[in-house]
Amino acid sequence: MGKLRVGVIGLGTFGRVHMQAYSGHPDVRLAAICDLDEKRVQEIGEEYGVTACFCDYKDLLGLPELDAVSIVTPDFTHTEIVIEAVRRGKGVLVEKPLATSLEDCERIGEALCARPVPFMVDFHNRWNPGVVRTKEAVESGELGAIEMIYHRLSDTLFVPTEMLSWAGRSNVNWFLGSHCLDTLRWLLADEVVRVYTVSESRVLRRMGIDTPDYYLSVADFSRGTRAVIENCWILPDSSPSIVDYKLEVIGEKGAVYFDPTPQRLVKLTQGISCPDTYGALKVHGRHVGFAIESIRHFVDCALAGRPPMVGFEDGRAATKAVLAMLESARTGMPVNL
């Protein structure tokens, strides 16, 4: 079996994670990269020894030797790139969300029906050790029927003000809420049937970024579980970690509490920081962590010819639920899915 020849489209913060995962995989050749920033793509190409460097994704997809691509571009740009990649017969690993409208999801689904290729949405919390252990507790029945869940995934102001140049064209529900919805769907093996969401736009709008500060949602699942979901982009930059993650699952017989942030490694120098110890880090020259493992899963599935754990329907379901939350926040009313 030969190596999987992969290209990466989008070289921002998480695009670099994809490159790290591929460059460290023995069965992958990182064959091409693409970014709108010509200087960035050339510098990263030199760093990783990639000579096929492009600023137009169609040029990258035109390489006949390419087997698959990672699409790590802003939320609202995924659809056309995914469809073009599928049309050209390339396997696709696309960052969440799959798309930001149901119409675009259906267009992607039609493309996949016309030309099936290895396809995965990168909801990498399915590889998060704490989430995996929680799912095992749910599936074993030791918690009993799951009554309620609290799920928090929030970021500091650094993310919408500095890390993402395009935050004003998206929102934290697409960026983080889609992760939460997939995690909960996977934990419960169940679907959201009703949502009620509130949001507020004050802090970021005053800073010239026209996107809500937060969304607070109540999501009802078909078998009776109720989840409270919190996603915000305005945690103080003085927080020791950019990300704040909490998961509490309460059942009739027991409960699971998962609280990985701030992480156990705390560094005190000129300030307080909590370096990543489990998401995507380098240990003895090798990139490891659950954000790396999801990408390796895609590679393994593409090489073996088996469907990845997270497919088109999972991406579509998360998009549908986020859209319902945005509609609820807009109208102030619950929305049935």
Image (spheres, grey):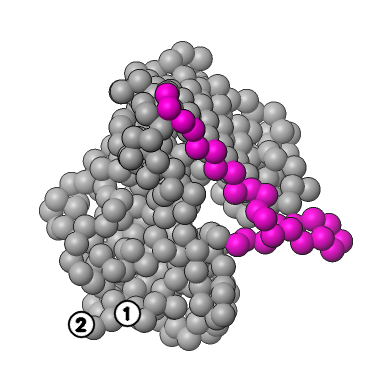
Where residue 39 sits, quadrant-wise, is bottom right
Q: Is residue 207 magenta?
A: no
233 w.r.t. 6: above or below? above
Q: Which of 255 and 116 is in front in this view?
A: 255
Say what secondary structure mark 1 lies in: loop
Instruction: Say whether marks 2 and 1 touch (CB < 8 Å).
Output: yes
Q: What stretch is highlighted in magenta?
A: 252-277
The residue lying at 82 percent from left, 60 percent from top is: 268
Q: Can residue 211 be seen in this view?
A: no
Q: Residue furthest top?
A: 333
Figure check: 49 above or below 312: below
Residue with the mark numbered 2: 1
**261 relative to 302 in the view: left or right:** right
Q: Residue at coordinates 56% horizontally, 73% vertically from top-left?
A: 282
Q: Closer to the camera, 207 or 297?
A: 297
| Residue at x 26%, y 43% (from the top left corner) | 313
Question: For the residue labelled by badge 2, is the local secondary structure a helix, a strand or a loop?
Answer: loop
The picture places residue 269, in percent across and down from the top left corner, at 84, 63
Query: Could you tell me what secondary structure mostly forms the magenta stretch?
Result: loop
Q: Name the residue under label 1.
A: 27
The N terminus - image quarter: bottom left
Q: Which residue is drawn at 51% across and 42% down?
A: 176
